[in-house]
Image: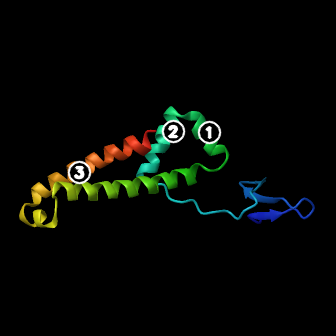
Amino acid sequence: MEKYITDERTGLKYELVGDYYLIAGDDEPEEDQPIGTWGQRHLRYLKEHHRVRYANLLTIGKLNDYLADLNEQAEELFLRLVKQMAEAEGVTEALKAENQMLWVQKMNNLRNAAMEIVSNELIYR
């Protein structure tokens, strides 16, 4: 049995799901974009606190795209914040060469602060 068939009379495209053919969308099937850590956190937040928004995105087929886009924005913001805060705090490669443990402590503090900012600004909204 073929994965996709088209009814010549109606022009509708059908997709084989299990033993049944269901109406498929007009477009070719797209590969789902990977959803990273930030997207998974926001998905959990939507399911628990914004069920209607979650259901709307799911039913119109935009949930995965929405989460992948949010994940990309969150990752870019996180990296930019860590870089800017490291420059402001004077956490440099020279410090890393002099005192590795202090550098690790400062970088962990900066990463945690950036995580909090990203979570408050993008994920839990």
Q: How crowded is mark 2: few (under 14 residues within 10 Å), some or many (20 or more)?
A: some
Q: Are marks 2 and 1 in contact (CB under 8 Å)?
A: no
Q: Are marks 2 and 3 in contact (CB under 8 Å)?
A: no
| Label 2 or label 1, whichever comes before in sequence order | 2
Q: Is disc 1 placed on a helix, strand or loop? A: helix
Q: Residues within 10 Å of mark 3 (few under 14, many from 20)?
A: many
Question: Which residue lies most toward the front here?
Answer: 88
**Residue type, numbered disc 3:** Leu
With 1 as the anchor, is 32 left or right in this view? left
Question: Which residue lies most toward the right here?
Answer: 9
**Which picture quadrant has residue 36?**
bottom left
Q: Which mark is residue 46?
A: 2
- Residue at point 48% right, 51% down? 70
Q: Mark 3 points at which residue?
A: 110
Q: Residue 55 carries which label?
A: 1
Distance from Cα at disc 3 to Cα at disc 1: 36 Å
Give coordinates of residue 49: x percent, y percent.
Answer: 50, 32
In the displayed structure, 94 sits above or below 47; it is below
- Residue at point 74% right, 58% down? 16
**Residue type, numbered disc 2:** Leu
Q: How many labels does the image show?
A: 3
Nearest the camera: 74 or 46? 74
**Residue type, numbered disc 1:** Ala
Question: Quadrant location of the N terminus?
Answer: bottom right
| Label 3 or label 1, whichever comes before in sequence order | 1
Whether residue 80 is visible, yes or no, is yes
**Which picture quadrant has residue 11?**
bottom right
With 21 as the anchor, is 90 left or right in this view? left
- Residue at point 79% right, 58% down? 14
Q: Is disc 3 placed on a helix, strand or loop? A: helix
